[in-house]
Amino acid sequence: MLGWLKARREAAEFSVDLPFDLSAPAFIADPYPSYAWLRENAPVAELQGGGYLLTRHADIRAALTNSALGNAPSRFSTLAPRNTQKYVAADLASHIPPFLDAPEHKPMRQMVSRSFFNAFKEMQDSLDVLARAQIAQLNAGDDLISAASQPFSVIAMCRFCGVASAPEQMKDFTQAFFHLFAPLRDPEVFAQVNAALAAFRAVLAEALEAGPPEGSLLAQMRAFQAQSEGITDAQIVDNCLLVFADGVENIEAGVASLMLVFEQAGIWDDLQSGTLSMELAVREGLRLQTPAQLVPRVAREGIELGGVQIKKDMPVFLALASGNRDGAVFDAPDTFDAA
């Protein structure tokens, strides 16, 4: 309760400008004061450049199952189906679940889900070995991201997907992929994103054509293709690209965030002795520092959210990281507590 009261007091002393700017340097550096203010003052906040941001836990949970909110890009988006012949980014979006609604998303979700879990069974034990080897190379004062979580995530996903490429090259590709989930208003940046995605595709297509290692994600997707109808090589490549990019960026952010949270909470000895559950600590750490901050949706029709009228085709961003620190749900939303 004291943590919640402290957060409310700090929120009262802090303010943001509306419409809200998701690209503001202060927000990127530390989004949590902005989230706290928005939950109290503008839980459905209008965004600069168009769209709305949901920050309350209850609103976010409701939005995740709201049939009026979909994944498919609006007709105004550069990622809309009408642009598949024009932009690599739009063609890629037409193949992967984050930008597909029912029924188009079903075969892609089935392929990704089944192939992912089959590949994970094959690699689960080797991940622990790889992680321990990476940690053993750390030196005092090393940057957690560049020295630990980033190389681990890239090497792990190369092996998981069945790709033999330079880790540095693949990291550059994954960063380009996540531009698809933010407004793309700069023509030069969008051109760079399309070029990087084309190169990313080429690497994965080459690995698929060459015959990926047995048990890898690409090999599992190829097996799924053989047992299904209508799955193309392009769809395999693009959905592998999705898993690869998600794996690298979320693992990198998640591992680094957890190491930082554990250090700040002073729980390393408890974890090593087994007096504190690693599973509970990871769950709480990811609540406190959520890797995937925002999830985008698009209004399929005109709807009302939190008393705000949302027009059809308007983007709506669900601030998962904000919901995970909502004092209406968590007694001490800004405090680590894995008990």
Image (cartoon, rainbow, N blue to C red):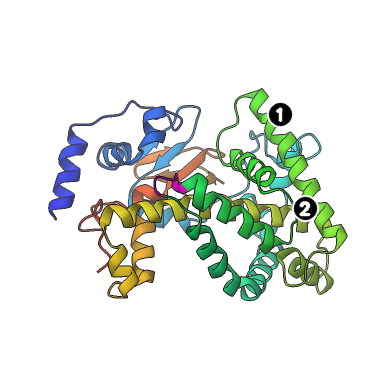
* Horizontal side, residue 42 vs residue 291: left or right: left
Q: Which residues are magenta?
A: 140-144
Quadrant for the N terminus in the image:
bottom left
Mark 1: few, some, or many residues within 10 Å (few <14, many ≥20)?
Answer: some
Q: How far apart in space, not on screen, are marks 1 and 2 (Cα)?
A: 20 Å
Residue 288: in sight, yes or no? no
| Residue at 68% over, 46% down | 170
Per the image, the residue denoted by label 2 is 204
| Residue 144 x/y as whole percent | 45, 48
The quadrant holding residue 235 is: bottom right
| Residue 35 x/y as whole percent | 32, 41
> Hey, what amino acid is under mark 1?
Ala
| Residue 311 x/y as whole percent | 50, 37
Q: Nearer the viewer, residue 2 or 144?
A: 144
| Residue 306 x/y as whole percent | 35, 45
Per the image, the residue denoted by label 1 is 191
* Horizontal side, residue 126 vs residue 40: left or right: right
| Residue at 71% over, 65% down | 217
